[in-house]
Image (tube, rainbow, N blue to C red):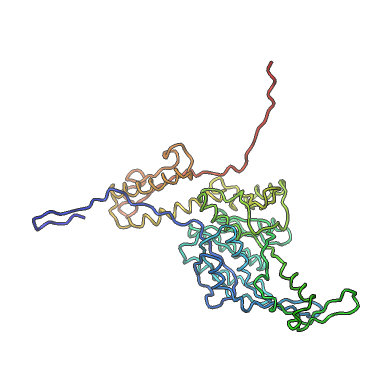
Amino acid sequence: MVTIKKTPGVYIEEISVFPPAIAAVDTAVPAFIGYTDDETSKLQAIKLDSLLDFEELYCDFDNWKLTYTVNENTIEEDFSRNELYYHMQLYFANGGGKCYVISLGRKVKNSGGRKEDFLAALEVLSKEDEPTLIVLPEATQLTYQSCMDVYQAALAQAANLMDRFVILDVPEVNDEIAAFRNGIGNNNLRFGAAYYPYLNTSISKYAKVRSEDINFKNLSIEDKEGKKTKNLTNVNIEQGNMDRQNMIQAIKAQTLVLPPSAAIAGVYASVDASRGVWKSPANVSLSFVSGLSRKISHEEQAELNVHPEGGKSINAIRSFTGKGILVWGARTLAGNDNEWRYINVRRFYNFVEESVKKATQQFVFEPNDANTWVRVSTMIENFLTNLWRQGALAGATPNEAFFVKVGLGVTMTFDDILNGIMNVEIGLAVVRPAEFIVLKFSQKIQES
């Protein structure tokens, strides 16, 4: 800024020689939507950094009492329906960090949840700027059509805002793959990825329940001879009863089968932190997972990975001898789209677009002239050059990796300038994953 000098003397003016810089936005900040123990924060987007934060805000462990009751020859269970807690354990165990939670409040007993709850939470999420992933593992418990409606609403939000990506589960129903592909629709598929099958986890459902808070009402078991039954009503008094202790031990040993989306969100966060958002979140092992609800063969994955009719690729999670449980797919739901087939490409574009968008806000209402154009293009080029050096972009030189164009006669006309429009064109050669590695062997004829 040039000031008019009126008094004789020596004046100091600092000259800025560096162009403005682009600050990289976070790439793996999931927003989890689900039911908890807390009603006070219902439909509020709250930022968390750890599982302990979730426990303090959303878990009422003092009231986690487990009661079994016989009702018309059926044993009914009464227990906390804070199922999001288990998904959060999977997320943090697999490398997750900072995240958002939108609680739907307490789930109604004997209910899979309400579609309206999830849609209301998505509306809240649409007003949040930082989240980059949408995760809704409990949507799988809705009626099938309601689940698909929620999924489509999440994909629509991601496409509209263009700064987030949806991780989807394939609900366990009859003929689940065909049902999912038919139900998910054909819109906004490049903004989401689906994973299959469910995970056998090492997470205990009742780990937080004290033994004295496990109640058996009107239950009975046979003694070793099978001649009579021992009534376990009011067993809390019978602290030394070995039958009771054995039952409690068996109950606490029960582990959960969960949809994979929360674990996958943790993988996204871990890979982004260690390698970068441009690296495919695949060929990564899963923690807190002991097995799969079903094993997928090489031939079966071919049908999941490539869907000739409508794309709709589904990423398999597979078990490999000596390697464990691995994420073995890297495609978006737009599996037949040459541009947006791969998860890392879509998410990398989200990252660059959002970072550049926020950095160029400072140039709104600046003169639309060559001086501003140079500053904008230099800022973007420096940002992309750094990404190229980190391996995010293909090409032996920056010129092969990207281009940035701006200027009169290049990206703008006089009419554009008169209407206050500055067009900037950016092209990126994003690194794509080596999805199929073909090794060709031949025999070499012996030379005499």
Q: Position of residue 198 (x, y in %)?
A: 68, 59
Q: Residue at x 30, y 48 (%)?
A: 18
**x 43%, y 37%: residue:** 397
- The image position of residue 1, as x and y in percent, is 21, 55
Q: Residue furthest front?
A: 240
Does residue 176 sit above or below 102 in this rendering? above
Point 71% across, 62% down: residue: 173
Q: Position of residue 106 (x, y in %)?
A: 60, 76
Total tally of numbered discs in the picture: 0
Residue 248 placement (x, y as % from top left): 74, 73
- Outermost residue toward the left in this view: 8
Left-right relation of 188 to 328: left
Q: Is residue 138 left or right of residue 389?
A: right
Q: Quadrant of the C terminus?
A: top right
Residue 441: name its quadrant. top right
Residue in the foreground of this view, choosing between 34 and 417: 34
Q: Nearer the viewer, residue 229 or 175?
A: 229
Vertical side of 253 occupied by 41: above or below: below
Position of 89 relative to 189 (above/below): below
Relative to the observer, which residue lies in front, 315 or 277?
Answer: 277
